[in-house]
Amino acid sequence: MNTPTTAPRRSPQQRVSSTTVRSHIAGEPDHEDGTAVPLVDPATGAVWGEAVVSPAAVHRAVAAAEQARATSGWAQLQGWQRAEVLRRLGALIARDAADLAEYETLANGKPLRSTTAEMTVLQRWYDFFAAAAETHTGSYRSLSPTRDGVVVEEPVGVVAAITPFNGALSLGSWKIAPALAVGNSVVVKPPVHAAASTARLAELALEAGLPPGVLNVVVGGAEEGAALAADERVDLVSFTGSTAVARRLGAVVAGRLGRFVCEAGGKSAHIVMDDADLGSAVIAVAQGLFSATGQTCVAGSRILVHEAIAAEFTARLKAHAAHIVVGDPYEGGTHLGPVASSAQLERIEGFVDDALARGAQPLFGGTRVEPGAELAGGNWFPPTVLEATTEDMAVCSEEVFGPVGVLHVFGSAEEALEIANSVEYGLAAGVWSASADTAHRMSRGLAAGTVWVNTYRAIDWRMPFGGYKQSGLGRENGLEAMREFTQVKSVVQDYGPHPDPFAIA
């Protein structure tokens, strides 16, 4: 692990345009009374601003969305008209990518170069769903010589989008763009400490021409999320976060027969076969595990390596990890920033300490680091890989959400699949093999919603994304996402005579 030498650090207050984050309702910042929650820079522990939280904002935001649904005309626009607004919104996000990226880095600790790239590429999501809105039509079916049928896909109405701290705006847009494309009104609830970028999005949406009330933002935590899930006026709840929270919210939504879509936890596996290109596999395994300090749902935290290449792979991975730079996320040479919060840091340490106590062998990492005096108050944990000696360690089966992986050695493809499929999650997986036949068999055998072959974390706006088993319900991205935010209506029209079936001849 390397740490960079940094110049005097600019404060967050010098970097962002606003240090007070508020809900945005019906086109205006919400200035009602609330509780001010301090916002903390995860790299230093210093307070850089505040977010104002008001549980009553949920009621006001849903009311605004419901009013916009009824009176704004957004749902009644033709698809190409909504597409124009979405394209403008995507362009505005790209224009303000630098400002938005600053907020995202302050929220989750990702290196600024990573969040800047995320904000820039978001335009493609909005452009994709704009194009989808233009071509989103119903279907005609000839049922008989005198009877026609039309299948119409209509917006569900009011959508609540509950987004995660590790990508409040990027992952939030996976919900917002398709929901708006088909004509819904949306209430977004980002986490308190990661709400700044989404609050800014609400302003950009108005600039793009979205009618007030069609997109509302509520700053809040668990209480506000639960209130959205329970609100009878919300037609669909789309959630990204842990499986435990997904279960709780899903039960609330199901109790009122609402619709629920979720992308929940993951414990993704890399399977490195004995014929794999080790150079490429090592780089991608490190990138898939340590990017965003491991705070991603698809972090490849289970590294399954064939016994014939285990020693060489391990040596290469250890050498590669030694060159990973941990430090200030604002420095251009940084690869790994801080963990998002002190609570998350303690959770990560708990998993590692438990594994070591149960006999796991650290290949590298495993204890806290401090990159420098200026960053001493931050939440720092190094790239870590443990060699599992038993499967009863929590780190082998539970989502850590940190830069911690576990190495397993297998002897056959069947054993690898058994290990990979043994957990309750099924979000993603990676297969590394030079054989197309092996890659095909392994990808078909994996119980995961996404399988990457000889690559990893190749997220694409055109491809559906979601989980098997306890990793979620429904799909985001791709045209499949459009269907999640619509409801289907069948219209049957008869043109023939209508004889009285009860007539007496």
Image (cartoon, rainbow, N blue to C red):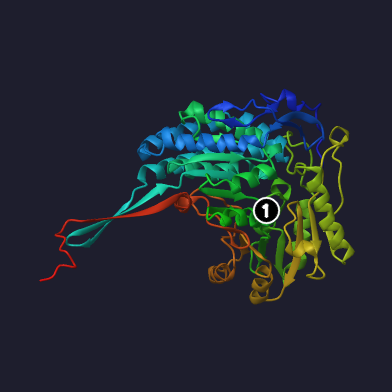
Residue 163 showing in the rendered view: no
User: x, y (%) of residue 153?
Assistant: 38, 50
Question: Quarter of the image containing the C terminus?
Answer: bottom left
Mark 1, residues whose alpha carbon is within 10 Å: few (<14), some, or many (≥20)? some
Q: Which residue is drawn at 60% across and 55% down?
A: 250
Question: Residue 278's quadrant in the figure?
Answer: bottom right
- Dot 1 amino acid type: Val
- Say if residue 37 shows up in the picture: yes
Residue 308: x percent and y percent? 72, 72
Residue nearest the observer in this picture, 497 or 176: 497
- Residue 367 appears left or right of 291: right
The local secondary structure at tag 1 comes to helix
In this figure, what is the number of numbered marks?
Answer: 1
Q: Identify which residue, 124 or 479, lies in the foreground.
A: 479
From what the image shows, is residue 7 above or below residue 171?
above
Residue 375 drawn at (x, y percent): 84, 35
Could you tell whether 150 is left or right of 70 in the image? Answer: left
Front one among 228 and 352: 228
Quarter assignment of residue 12: top right
Apparent side of residue 81 relative to residue 291 in the rendered image (left or right): left
Q: Which residue lies furthest to the front in this view?
A: 504
Query: Residue 455 location in percent, x, y?
Result: 60, 56
Residue at image position (67%, 57%) is 243
> Residue 314 sits in which quadrant?
bottom right
From what the image shows, is residue 284 above or below residue 46?
A: below
Nearest to the observer: residue 387 or residue 379: 379
Mark 1 sits on what residue? 245
- In the displayed orientation, state which residue is furthest to the left: 505
